[in-house]
Image (cartoon, grey):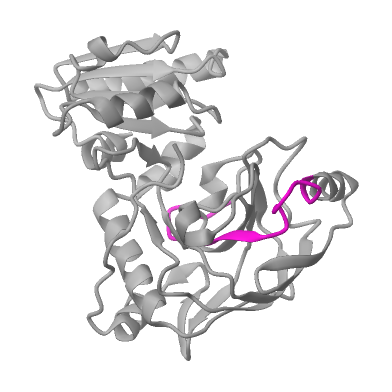
Amino acid sequence: MDTLCTSYLELQPDDRVLVLYSDELHGDDDQRLLETLGQRIRAGSAEVRVEPADRFDKRRVGGFEVLLLVSMVSSIHRAAVLEYLQTTEKPKHTRIFRLFNFSPALFSLPLAVDRASLDSLNNSVIAAAKRAHDIHVTNPAGTDVHIRPVPDGGWTNSCGYFNGQFPAILPPGEVNTYTPHVTGIVVVDGAINSSFGFPGDPRLARNPVTLEITDSVVQRAGCCDPVVSGVLSNFFEVENADRVGEVGFGTNEGITEWVGFLSHINERHPGLHLGLGTPTQSRTKVGWTAPLHLDMILDGCSIWFDEALVFSDGRWDRAALDGQSQGHTVGEVLHIDAV
């Protein structure tokens, strides 16, 4: 919890902190973890309130330097928080964070990595990828896919940074873009994440999903697990759900294992993930939209930017990335990928 408090929340001794937690966190273990979190925040701040998220009072929020919205999967008071950030005068007095997947794994895996390190790596990946003409990804399970970035595809840097426009999102650790040029075989052997739930363990090591993709459209999908197969079948009945709306690269190298629940933790796992359905970039960049989003996350992949191997054995090669970027700057990026 130290990294959360110092690197992400950037607590100061005179900060007042309001923690609002969702009704998902009603179990004894959840409450004990919330109590521990409150104690750690209290040690580095002037005041902390830990309360159920029954309501969002924007007049009250202004009395705190930090608002931490804690949940497992739900986005607490989503509309009210966005309205507050859009209408409140700048600069914002209150730093607002959404913390998903509240669990011991959240603190031992993704939040073991500090924000500055993640931000630096994310910028290196974006700068190098923007210069690449071809991104080639393979894995031992059979993936062989080529991705061609486009100049106007947009990029997102998810590093847990609050920029005043959207809440900062935790757990952090990915970059993503949109391109209509994804073609090849993708064998998804890591995990699934979704915007609509999943009836079981989302890990796929025993039952990988195979996708055949042409020009960012899924032509065929298969899985020997009947539950996963049924979810895919229903999902692809939704308009534009068969389109790749996101090419994502997990960058949080603190995540060294898969967790058995739907999570941003799995999505931040180092390597490639493809988001089917809802694009992460704006409709003006993409030209279409979809109501649902399904992340297909790979394990153990190797990634080449043109001829340079930039990712293997679960780690990004910083020297190779710097060699590819050749001083190229990242330009304008979003610092948000979920709200």
Examine the rendered structure and indicate whether residue 239 appears above or below residue 78.
below
Examine the rendered structure and indicate whether residue 288 appears above or below residue 23.
below
Q: Going 31% across and 37% down the picture, which residue do you hit?
A: 4
Q: What are the residue bounds of the magenta stretch?
A: 235-257
Q: Is residue 188 left or right of residue 327?
A: right
Residue 166: image quadrant is top left
Q: Position of residue 200 (x, y in %)?
A: 76, 37
Q: Going 31% across and 81% down the picture, which residue do you hit?
A: 325
> What is the quadrant of the N terminus in the image?
top left
Q: Going 67% across and 49% down the picture, which residue do you hit?
A: 192
Can I make out residue 281 in this image?
A: no
Q: Is residue 252 shown in magenta?
A: yes
> What is the quadrant of the C terminus in the image?
top left
Q: Is residue 285 left or right of residue 41?
A: right
Examine the rendered structure and indicate whether residue 306 appears above or below residue 19.
below
- Camera-side residue of 37 and 247: 247
- Camera-side residue of 154 and 163: 154
Q: Is residue 85 left or right of residue 208?
A: left
Q: Is residue 165 left or right of residue 286?
A: left
